[in-house]
Image (cartoon, helix red, strand yellow):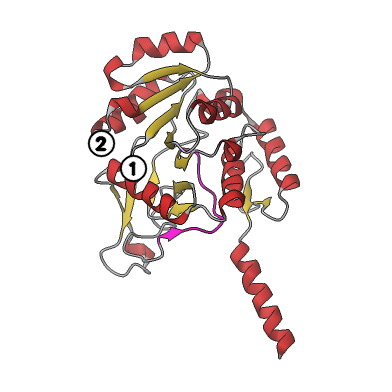
């Protein structure tokens, strides 16, 4: 179950070194697995000066912007390649545990995952077994909203948002094509779901990353206007799958994926009512 790691980064060589690269070193991930994708030759020169050459396999010049680099990375690797995508500011990988009653959220605690390599291999093994080629982790590192490992329902395969900061794919170049910049991880989630009939989310695992908080990266090139434009585009293209999330207090137009299970339950209830 071999895999590679792909890390897109822009104007954050110091952040990458202190966060994601340091995290991968702690977990003893072999450097020959690590590919770092950059926007241009100038960035390549800056990152080459900052990073230890023994800490990665390749520095690769790709495209500018999140849409451009995402499309470039998926085409760079072979169809069917097992790829783990990581943001450049991942400080820690968490596992949610509950030593008491898993249904009691107050008992949920975050601890650092013991083996990143073991988790990644487990995730890809599940992808192969189910045929669901895209997996990810819970999008927030808040134990109250997560499922503890002890909860037998901590892994889901229905339509749920798979965050872009830490996710894996068995590379499907068709599903990887991005038409938008911001919210591109929603687009990827939807395309893999429609292609495979499901996506995998480990609701007991999360990571420490702050998308809108750090200078550089996505914030440097994609802001509120493009974010809102992308949200509207997804709602227009997938109205049965995407809606506005009015529950989020944010300057960005936040969206959410529709709960298809609720619709199925409603249809079943309606059919039962008609029969009666």
The residue depicted at 35 percent of the width and 63 percent of the height is 106
- Left or right position of 59 against 225: left
Q: Quadrant of residue 265?
A: bottom right
Q: Height in image: 221 above or below 1?
A: above
Distance from label 2 to label 1 (Cα)? 18 Å
Q: Label 1, on which residue? A: 1
Magenta stretch in the rendered image: 154-165
Quadrant of the image containing the C terminus: bottom right
Q: From where the camera sits, is residue 52 visible?
A: no
- For label 2, the SS is loop
Position of residue 14 measured from the top left corner of the image (x, y, whole percent): 38, 19
Tell me, yes or no, whether the highlighted magenta stretch contains residue 138.
no
Left or right: 155, with 26 as reference point: right
Q: Is residue 241 above or below residue 273?
A: above
Q: Image point 68% across, 74% down: which residue?
A: 267
Please name the residue shown 43% across and 8% down the image.
45
Q: Nearer the viewer, residue 249 or 263?
A: 263
Across and down, in percent, residue 33 comes to 33, 29
Q: Residue at x 32, y 51 (%)?
A: 95
Q: Earlier in the sequence, mark 2 or mark 1?
A: 1
Dividing the picture into quarters, in which one does residue 129 lie? Answer: bottom left
Magenta residue check for 160: yes
Name the element at disc 1: loop
Is 184 above or below relative to 157? above
Residue 44 location (% of width, % of height): 45, 12
| Residue hosting label 2 | 27
Give the crowd class for mark 1: few <14, some 14-19, many >=20 residues within 10 Å.
few
Quarter containing the N terminus: top left
């Amino acid at each position: 179950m071999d895999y590679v790691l792909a890390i897109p980064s822009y104007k954050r060589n110091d952040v990458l070194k202190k966060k994601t690269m340091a995290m991968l070193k702690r977990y003893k991930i072999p450097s020959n697995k690590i590919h770092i994708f950059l926007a241009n030759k100038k960035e390549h020169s800056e990152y080459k000066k900052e990073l230890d050459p023994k800490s990665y396999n390749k520095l690769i010049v790709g495209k500018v912007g999140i849409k451009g680099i995402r499309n470039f990375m998926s085409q760079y690797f072979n169809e069917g390649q097992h790829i783990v995508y990581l943001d450049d500011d991942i400080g820690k990988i968490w596992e949610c545990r509950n030593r008491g009653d898993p249904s009691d959220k107050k008992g949920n605690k975050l601890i650092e995952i013991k083996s990143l390599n073991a988790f990644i291999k487990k995730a890809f093994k599940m992808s192969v077994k189910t045929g669901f080629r895209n997996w990810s982790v819970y999008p927030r590192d808040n134990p109250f909203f997560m499922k503890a490992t002890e909860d037998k329902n901590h892994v889901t395969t229905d339509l749920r948002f798979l965050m872009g900061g830490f996710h894996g794919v068995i590379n499907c170049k068709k599903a990887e094509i991005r038409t938008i910049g911001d919210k591109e991880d929603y687009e990827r989630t939807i395309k893999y779901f429609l292609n495979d009939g499901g996506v995998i989310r480990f609701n007991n695992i999360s990571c420490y990353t702050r998308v809108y908080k750090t200078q550089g990266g996505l914030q440097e090139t994609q802001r509120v206007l493009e974010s809102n434009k992308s949200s509207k585009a997804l709602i227009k293209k997938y109205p049965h799958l995407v809606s506005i999330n009015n529950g989020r207090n944010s300057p960005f137009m936040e969206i959410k994926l529709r709960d298809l299970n609720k619709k199925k339950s409603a249809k079943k209830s309606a059919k039962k009512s008609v029969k009666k």
